[in-house]
Amino acid sequence: MNFFEFKELSSNILCPPGNGVFTVNTAKERKELLHSKLFENSDNPSDEWLKCFDNIQNWNKTHLLGVCSDTGGGILRGANWGPLFVRLELLKELKHKNDFIDLGDIRVIPHLLHDKYLNESTLSSCKKALYGDKDSPHPVSPLSLVEYFLDHLYSIKSESNVFAIGGDHSVSYPLVKSWLKNKNKNNIKTALLHFDAHTDLLVERLGIDLCFGSWVTHILDDLPSPSLCHQVGIRSSGKDKSHWEKTFGVHQYWTKEVKSKGPTAIAETIIQKMKAEGTEEIYVSFDIDAIDSNYASATGTPEPNGLEPHEAIVILELVCKEFKVTGADMVEVSPFLDTGNTKGREPDTTLETSALISSLLIREMNKNGDN
Ligand SMILES: [Mn+2]
């Protein structure tokens, strides 16, 4: 695929930043606000957005991708609004819209998850709805589209650094999968750093294998070794740490350990283990519920007794000093959920916290482009 064909593909399967939730009038003002910030006073945000694809050869900043899918969630939904709201908060944090290249949002049919769950007639009718062609070669479900898009992006520019905003945590499955395929092909040694209150290590949930609670189990098949998966902030689990480590071969750092040993010691352990495996590049998947519900209540499964934002930041900063971050995501931010766990704090601390951590990751990834 050449650059022209890639632009054409992107214009079909993506939409302008913040537009990934299909609405007629809902949130119109907020979408317009984002467009006015990203594209200044352009009359036509769609044209302005597509212009960024004319310059792919010179892209050296982090690429932003919104995935407005919460079909893989299952307790409280609403993470489909993450990409619009987190971007607006991120622009305050980064101060400059040129700190990233906004690829836009994946086009999402909110009732679908992955194409493998669809029959032929549903596939045809969804292709007709999205692309005007029932025989289109493009997939139609959000998880399938993410993998398809990134496979093409990495094939034309394998050193692309993508920061994605979810969406429920199932979106990390195709994000990490495509990143791993690209890194494995280029013989780059990888590791996965996963922040979460939960292990996400179910094999399936009610018969569905790809969802917010099971994506890690299935991405382990693509990691060269399960010991390359490091999970930080776990505290809500029916089984103890040794069960998960023995059953799956992952490394876990539960919140109570981060509190007792301190974030610096935890980071040093992670660094030492990753170095022992020869890790060169890492992917950071950040579920906002890793952070204590006092700060991050606007999420599907807020959990008390979690990490303080600064504890996560210390760990990230130390690990990022040692390894290049070349892929990352911020997921499970559900801006319309106010679950009442804020103990007097403003309900939008979730957005501020997610933007703080996202901006740190974007700045780290931008360093790769400066080399
Ligand atoms: Mn999760």
Image: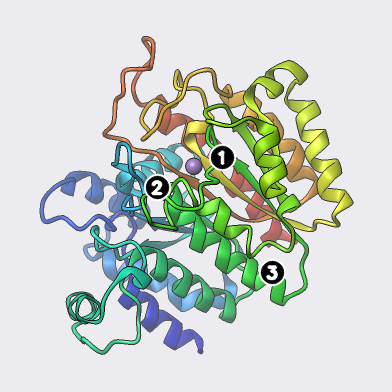
- Numbered tag placed on residue 168 in the rendering: 2
**Callouts 3 and 1 close, C-beta under 8 Å:** no
The amino acid type found where label 2 is placed reads Asp
- Numbered tag placed on residue 183 in the rendering: 3
Front: mark 2 or 1: 1
Ligand 1 under 8 Å from disc 2 Cβ: no
User: Upstream in the sequence, badge 2 or badge 1?
Assistant: 2
User: Is 112 placed above or below 8 here?
Assistant: above
**Callouts 2 and 3 close, C-beta under 8 Å:** no
x and y, in percent, of residue 130 in the image: 22, 75
x and y, in percent, of residue 18 in the image: 31, 54
Q: Residue at x 81, y 42 (%)?
A: 271
x and y, in percent, of residue 192 in the image: 67, 51
The amino acid type found where label 1 is placed reads Thr
Q: Residue at x 53, y 17 (%)?
A: 305
Q: Residue at x 62, y 47 (%)?
A: 363
Please tell me which residue lies in front, 90 or 226: 226
* Gap in angstroms between the C-alphas marked 2 and 1: 14 Å
* Gap in angstroms between the C-alphas marked 2 and 3: 24 Å
User: Upstream in the sequence, badge 3 or badge 1?
Assistant: 3
Please tell me which residue lies in front, 341 or 25: 341
Please tell me which residue lies in front, 305 or 211: 211
- Is there any visible trace of residue 245 in the rendered image? yes
SS class, disc 2: loop
Say which quarter of the image contains residue 171.
bottom left
SS class, disc 3: helix
